[in-house]
Image: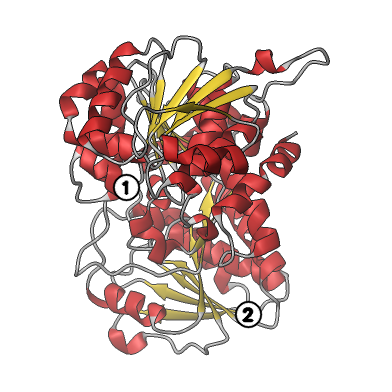
Amino acid sequence: MIKILPIAKVREGDHYTIGNEPIASINLMERAARRMASWINRNIRTARKINIVCGPGNNGGDGMALARTLTDKDYETAVFLYNPEDKLSQDNKTNLERLQRMQEITLNIIKTEKDLPDFSTDDVVVDALFGSGLTRGIKGVAAKLVHHINSSECLVISVDTPSGLYSDKPSHSKNNAIIKADYTLTFQFPKLGFMFAENAPYMGQWEVLDIKIHNDYVNAVETRDFYLQQDDVRNSIKSRQKFSHKGHFGHALLISGSYGKMGAAVLASQACLRTGAGLLTSHIPTLGYNILQTAVPEAMTSLDASDTVFTGIKDIQHYQAIGTGPGIGTSSQTQQALKLLIQNSSIPILFDADAINILAENKTWISFVPKNSIFTPHPKEFERLAGKASSNFETLEKQREFSIKYGVYVVLKGAHTAISCPDGNVFFNSTGNPGMATAGAGDVLTGIILGLLSQNYDSRNACIIGVYLHGLAGDIAADDQGWESLIARDIIRYIGKAYNQLK
């Protein structure tokens, strides 16, 4: 998995590489420029003019090194250097001297508003103004330059981080000027800010470029945040043996459904079985019997005493995994039944949807939840559990603290679903797409994770594999169906293909 580092540790990695590879800092900059140029060469046709807007620091140096490299690849390039104080970093100064020896590149200096460049709408603008080095908001002429780029209608590519966007803290302010990139080419490590919806308007699509930061540093540096990759999941999946039988893959209990919400029980049940549970018993209100037996004939049913809601279940001792929440509602009877379930369970419980909403109304019960249980909230459900936050950064810390305090896993659903663990580590998912923003997708995720728990995956691996598999099945489905047409059942239908792709 890829480590997500704060900017201070990213800088440490640069310095460590410079001292221990060894490589001169100016040559590390050349390496980064070659990686960016290779990406541009694959994605941008040479007929388009590349305008590279550079600042006075090392981000600007990256931009000037990129200009030279692109010129060698037959791109028409122009460089616009914002340098109001005639003060450049040493590597920037070296790159400027090298640039000035190339007559093919037009160099323009920006000091005042009158110097703002003219761009054609078919041009590409590369933002190498400030990158991740900023500690305060962009003001004055630089802010006007940012707004000028944003209004240009050009394709915008940011170097490392969109200028004006903080990586490790919130960036939002009415007065903040922030580049709105179509693409962000970041170096070696994703930035924490890339994981959050509040920054989506500025990052566009982002890609990590490997600039060969020294392996000793990459392996040794400590972090609490990680970005999941396919190999992380592939290496954790258990193989099935020739003489295995259904008893080897566990018996799961799913408590779900109520009047008008039996679809949630159907989706979660189907997903649980499709993920590989040996046996599944779905505990449902009596009204749902015909529905579930018809829609999921592979599942056994346990019928509640109530026709319409969950009011209790007597024997839970012979199940290897328990999940509850999809479609159960929040009636007073259901709340008391959930309280008894928590008290009687000797194994972790998977809480989703209404089960989370009930716990949010009865927060004192959370302390009695079995250790290593799993919560799978969407953002509003988590807000009910942990309180409001002013930014996604604050939400992340609340999530981390919740997991540590109660000894549980929290799967906070989103574009980069975040899995927080009792040890404080957080894993961000890399699969999934906007088509999965559809009714029932969360019920499918509950079923997938429950199916993994029944197969004796521990809670951590059940969350990591489940979230990645869910997103991958959604990606494969979207390739076939398109984002707009994707429905929750499509995700279930492609779980098998997702497994095959991982294998």
Left or right: 473, with 458 as reference point:
right
Task: Please state which of residues 370 and 29 is positioned toward the viewer in this rendering.
Answer: 370
- Is residue 493 in view from this perspective? yes
Q: Quadrant of the N terminus?
A: top right
Q: Mark 1 and mark 2: span between their CA atoms?
A: 54 Å
Q: Which residue is mark 2?
A: 103
Q: Position of residue 473 (x, y in %)?
A: 63, 46
What residue do we see at 37% from left, 85% from top?
116
Disc 2 secondary structure class: loop
**Picture quadrant of residue 422:** top left
How are the colours assigned in the image?
secondary structure
Q: Which residue is mark 1?
A: 379
Q: Quadrant of the C terminus?
A: top right
Q: Earlier in the sequence, mark 1 or mark 2?
A: 2
Q: Position of residue 260 (x, y in %)?
A: 39, 50
User: In the rendered image of this protein, does residue 422 appear above or below residue 200?
Assistant: above
Q: Position of residue 325 (x, y in %)?
A: 38, 35
For badge 1, the amino acid type reads Pro
For badge 2, the amino acid type reads Gln
CB under 8 Å between callouts 1 and 2? no
Disc 1 secondary structure class: helix
Eye-nearest disc, 1 or 2: 1
What residue do we see at 45% from left, 9% from top?
317
